[in-house]
Amino acid sequence: MNYLDFEKPLAEIEGKAEELRALARANPAMDISKEAEALDRKSDSLLKDLYKSLTPWQKCQVARHPDRPHTRDYIEGLFAEFTPLAGDRGFADDHAVMGGLARFNDQPVVVIGHEKGHDTKSRIERNFGMARPEGYRKAVRLMDMADRFNLPVITLIDTPGAYPGKGAEERGQAEAIARSTAKCLEIGVPLLSIVVGEGGSGGAVAFATANRIAMLEHSVYSVISPEGCASILWKDAEKMREAAEALRLTAQDLQKLGVIDRIIKEPMGGAQRGRKETVEAVGKAIEAMLAEMAGKKRAEILKDRRQKFLAMGAKGLAA
Amino acid sequence: MNWISNYVRPKINSLFSRREVPENLWTKCPECGTMLFHRELAGNLNVCSSCDHHMAINPRDRFTSLFDGGIFTEVKVPEPPADPLHFRDQKKYPDRLKAAQKASGEREAMLVAEGEIGRTPIVAAAQDFSFMAGSMGLYVGNAILAGAERAVKLKRPFVLFSAAGGARMQEGILSLMQMPRTTVAVQLLKEAGLPYVVVLTHPTTGGVTASYAMLGDVQIAEPNALIGFAGARVIEQTIREKLPEGFQRAEYLLDHGMLDRVTHRKSMREELITILRMLMGLSPAVKGDLPPPGDLAVAADAK
Ligand SMILES: [Zn+2]
């Protein structure tokens, strides 16, 4: 288990319980069950306390937790016959973006998502989920295909942001993001997005301009990272707690602002403590959102999406 | 030869100037250090007469030099909620807004207007970098939508002068949502078969570049304008190498296929007229059909 900063007290208690159990394994005659149970109860209640009221900055940490399920896990757990489709047909295949054909409950769909990787090797290969222009252009190509063959598109959002690189700029990072956002608005098939971890700015919006947008309970979605915002507005990157607070980047705030439609509950202690349940909960949400869009005609789907964004923010937090 | 910008414009500029006597009569060119007299600088559309550096020009002055006779009508922009997130950093967002309004005399970071250029009716929008770095929030989103809707209603092309550091952080996620909202505006023009021309000015970066500023039918930039998605410092920190000379500058982007043209501010008006008239299927612009300078001065006085 990778513990986050604010989980330190929990790590201590769970560590003690583990020591005790190790001791008992070494000395079978020793009875530690009472003490171990007490420690378990204590850690359970501490976990509940910690996760009952996570601060926005703590949510950012949970959203970035390396053990959270990633796009790869959702595809494995929820989709059958996943057939990855690669390349932007211009320059390269971007491994930070997974995409392809798949079946969701037998229904053929196109699934696209940022993939951060799960160990050092795959994280480097996936560029930590930071897409280059080719990633967005691949997505545009796949969305186009979905549109032509009338397949719903499901996007999984989990990126710190688009990659800030020299080549990425030279090959038109901004244009690629703009075209991807535009494509989201142009397809006459249902587009459903789930923010499963980090929704990092333009790199996220390029896939998440959808008919229905859901967020996992402790995921975040923001115009800028709290660290970036703090260094610009507070002139001090260490003020990320304040920035996270001010930016209103939690799923709960985004729902109040009318930016997202639903929040998917995470297991106690976050998605990283119940990967399987989290994947299943996301599956249920996809099912529900697909059902909401079922039977809608192309024109209706296009209008629904356009109206959703035009109306967004009209009332601020009072919405 | 563009007689109207060389001869009449300085006069109109001075007539329309909001600030009768600028606080500083002299401006130092940030590129070459030459001291430039304010009247000469304004007459030269804020381009340094010594090194050709294009300084910022506020939307009102740009429109005055762009539209025939310096005459334009503002397009009304629907008011968004004032402080949608109740945002506060070291200052309250409403206080930052008030300070920017006081300093600029403008409501927000974008001005939208309709008028004629070379007798070609257009709708134009211009972003004001001096207003909170031109940042895109709900107002700028509303302004672009209002401009596009007006252009569609009047069946006119839409010209947009961009200048922004990116999205307005103080409006959080709602500023990010202006990327799709302004993209809808561009799509309205596309569906109506109307040209959308973007003029990228210094600097245009972040979420602005990654939405409406990169979606033009024709993409023109002013010389040496900084245009990009990520900031150069962030890129250098990420890739740990120095960026090449001219990186993210207009000419560099032109070389990399991201722009159609890089055009000097003094030629911009003529170029827009030429391009828009062709895209709109109009006859070539007749240079002689403009009223003589005398009539213009009278028209300006009467206003
Ligand atoms: Zn100069």
Image (cartoon, rainbow, N blue to C red):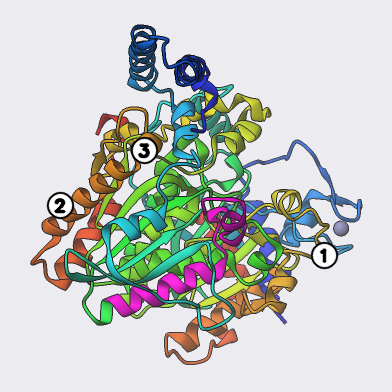
Location of mark 1 (residue)? B244
Q: Nearer the viewer, residue B70 or A50?
A: A50
Write the start and end of the magenta stretch as one range.
A117-146
Q: Nearer the viewer, residue B4 or A66?
A: A66
Residue B168 placement (x, y as % from top left): 51, 42
Q: Secondary structure at mark 3?
A: helix
Location of mark 3 (residue)? A271
The quarter of the picture where residue B24 lies is: top right
Q: Are marks 3 and 2 in contact (CB under 8 Å)?
A: no
Amino acid at dot 1: Pro
Residue A146 placement (x, y as % from top left): 29, 76
Is residue A119 in the magenta section? Answer: yes
The quarter of the picture where residue B259 lies is: bottom right
Residue B209 to residue A187: above or below: above
Amino acid at dot 3: Ala
- Residue B154 left/right relative to B101: left
Residue A63 placement (x, y as % from top left): 44, 38
Label disc, if present, on residue A288 of the rendered structure: 2
Chain letter of the residue carrying label 2: A
The residue lying at 65 percent from left, 41 percent from top is: B19
Circle 3 or circle 2, nearest the eye: 3
Circle 3 or circle 1, nearest the eye: 3
Res. B235 visible in picture: yes
What whole-number distance in Å separates the C-alpha atoms at marks 3 and 1? Answer: 43 Å
- Residue B240 left/right relative to A177: right
